[in-house]
Amino acid sequence: MENRPRILFFGFSDVGYRCLKLLLDKGCDVIGVFTHDADPHEAHWFQTPESLAKENFIRVFKPGTLKTEKWFRKVRYMKPDLILSLYYRNFIPEEIFSQARLGAYNMHGSYLPAYRGRAPLNWSIINGEDHCGVTLHTIEKKFDAGEIVDREKVAFGPDEYVGDIQPRVAAAAVRVLERSLPSLLAGVPRLEKQDESKASYFGKRAPEDGRIDFSKSAREVFNLVRGVSRPFPGAFAEIGGRRYTIWRARPLEDFKGGRAGEIVSREPFIIACGKGALEVSECDESPARE
């Protein structure tokens, strides 16, 4: 295929891997892959675009930051026609994304304009939503605020865990990219402005953010448990000198008795909440950390 647009790929995680595979399977000209390593506390549960790029003899770059003249010059030298960012976590400066003559586009893991920022799926579950989604949008200076090319909702039930939902989000991202790809390569995508009145923003999560506040309701505590369960670090609490990392549970919303955070039963394992209680079916127990 002659005169194929030159695609510069920025990506990470299972979405990055699967979307890069889509591009390669379709015979796209991927001229380089920018990626990064996982966070130290992060479980390595996904295949990476780095491994796929190396298998296909595509150059891989892993800069700690793109905000240097070195990388501005490097991208100018590579002459990309199209820039695609698929779950790439580092900031892409305007000096880089403006160089693609066909535009630069990012895949975000929410149904924009809701849940801009980091960890949108985790936050959606924690906040008791019934859906998340993926959105392909233009890259601008402001995070996740660009015009929308395409998006797709991913619905989930009130008892589903993040590890069950994440594969559906990744599959939706691949579908959105596949639908959008012909118009992106032709330089004629249909764009829709985001409704700023419906925008929300949430920040990065760290393992410590999984600490359980048992003064909250059983449903709120359960939403935290399922929102940060495997493959994420898990929700945890320290009770009576022991640390409990809770992976699976169910809310007992009509339960009465016990103080918030008190273990009221061992068989079954029940911890009282501010309203109701949490019945724990799977957890790890260890001495509390000092």
Image (tube, rainbow, N blue to C red):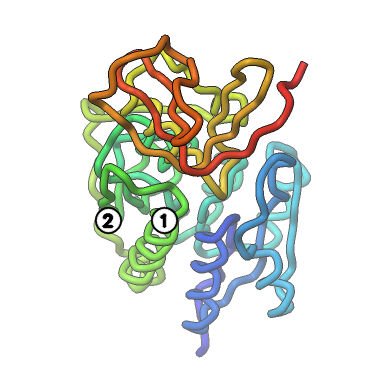
Residue 245 horizontal side relative to residue 290, left or right: left
Residue 189 horizontal side relative to residue 164, left or right: left
Residue located beneath label 1 in the image: 164
Q: Amino acid at mark 1?
A: Asp
Q: Residue at x 29, y 53 (%)?
A: 154
Give the percent coordinates (x, y) of residue 84: 50, 58
> Label 1 to label 2, Cα distance in Å?
18 Å
The secondary element bearing badge 1 is classed as helix
Label disc, if present, on residue 152 of the rendered structure: 2
Q: Is residue 286 above or below residue 189?
A: above
Q: Decide which of 170, 181 is in the foreground and name it.
A: 170
Q: Residue at x 68, y 71 (%)?
A: 53
Considering every residue shown, the one lying at the far top of the view is 259
Give the percent coordinates (x, y) of residue 216: 37, 16
Q: Is residue 19 above or below residue 246?
A: below
For the question of whether residue 5 can be seen, the reply is yes
Give the percent coordinates (x, y) of residue 88: 57, 49
